Every structure is written in structure tokens, then in C-alpha cells.
Image: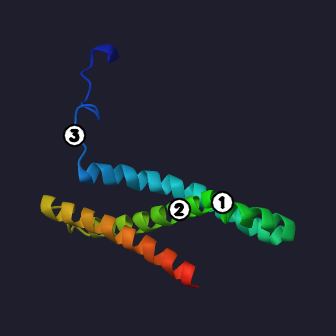
Amino acid sequence: MSAHNRPLSPHLQVYKPQLTSVMSICHRATGIALAAGVLLLVWWVVAAAAGPEAFATAHGFLGSWFGMLILFGFTGALMYHLCNGIRHLFWDAGYGFELETAYKSGWMTLGAAAVLTVVAWIIVAAG
């Protein structure tokens, strides 16, 4: 059978998105976002070491509304990736594979990530 005659597997166009599949995709996307965010944090630290002018430039960007939006997104990605990583640790130990449990833990992960993101920003704003 040639490669052109092979049947194609159903893909995203055929299947209805499920919570578990969407969360899996989001886990990968937040991992990529965290890698990009680390580069931003490295820029900030290097700017602090480079002197007052470089730090003022970095701090000015990160303190702008756009910079704060990026930092909020970075915080959300970090908290989601953390909470979903903990969920995966339970799966690695063999717990939580039942469909009802997988959905409950998925919604708990989303809720915990949202709460942790808001709490982190409240703590930063208060301090």
C-alpha cells in the first residue's frame, strides 16, 4: 500500500474537543510560554547587572500595561503548568484515570491555577 492510499486518522477537525485533550494541548503551550518568559526574566536580570540605564529600560517595559499583561500571562502559565504537573504526577502513580475523576481533577486544576495566579498578584501588589 503506497503512502498516498493510506487511510488518514481522524484529527482535530473530526473529534469534538474534550477537557482532557484541551488541557494536554494547553500544558504543552504553557511549557513553551514559560520558556519564552524565562528569556524575558533573564533580560531583566542582565539589565539589572548592566547598570541603571539598562535596568530603567527593562523596568519601564515590564512596568508598562503591556509588560504587566505579559507578566500576568506568564504567572498564569506558570500556575497552570504547576497544577497540571501535579495532576500528572498522580496519573504517573496510577491514580485518577477514571473518566469522572479525570474531569474533576481537570476542573480543579483550572480553578487552582486561576486562584493561585490572582493570589500571587495580590501578594505582589500588597508588598
Which residue is found at the position 32% from the left and 64% from the top?
110
Q: Quadrant of the C terminus?
A: bottom right
Local packing at callout 3 (Cα closer than 10 Å; few below 14, some 14-19, many 20+) is few
| Sequence order check, earlier mark of 1 and 3 | 3
- Identify the residue position indicated by label 3 in the image: 16
Choose between 43 and 123: the one closer to the eye: 123
Residue type indicated by callout 2: Phe
| Mark 3 residue element | loop
Which residue is found at the position 73% from the left and 64% from the top?
60
Would residue 21 be found to the left or right of residue 40 on screen? left
Q: Are marks 1 and 2 in contact (CB under 8 Å)?
A: yes
| Mark 2 residue element | helix
- Relative image position of residue 17 (x, y in whole percent): 25, 44
Occupied quadrant, residue 84: bottom left
In the rendered structure, find residue 23 and report the number of the disc placed on it: none
Local packing at callout 1 (Cα closer than 10 Å; few below 14, some 14-19, many 20+) is some
Which residue is found at the position 48% from the left and 56% from the top?
31
Q: How far is mark 1 from mark 3, CA to CA?
A: 36 Å
Would residue 41 be found to the left or right of residue 29 on screen? right
| Sequence order check, earlier mark of 3 and 2 | 3
Would residue 8 be found to the left or right of residue 122 on screen? left
Q: How far is mark 3 from mark 2, CA to CA?
A: 28 Å
Asked whether the viewer can see residue 96, the reply is yes
Would residue 77 be found to the left or right of residue 17 on screen? right
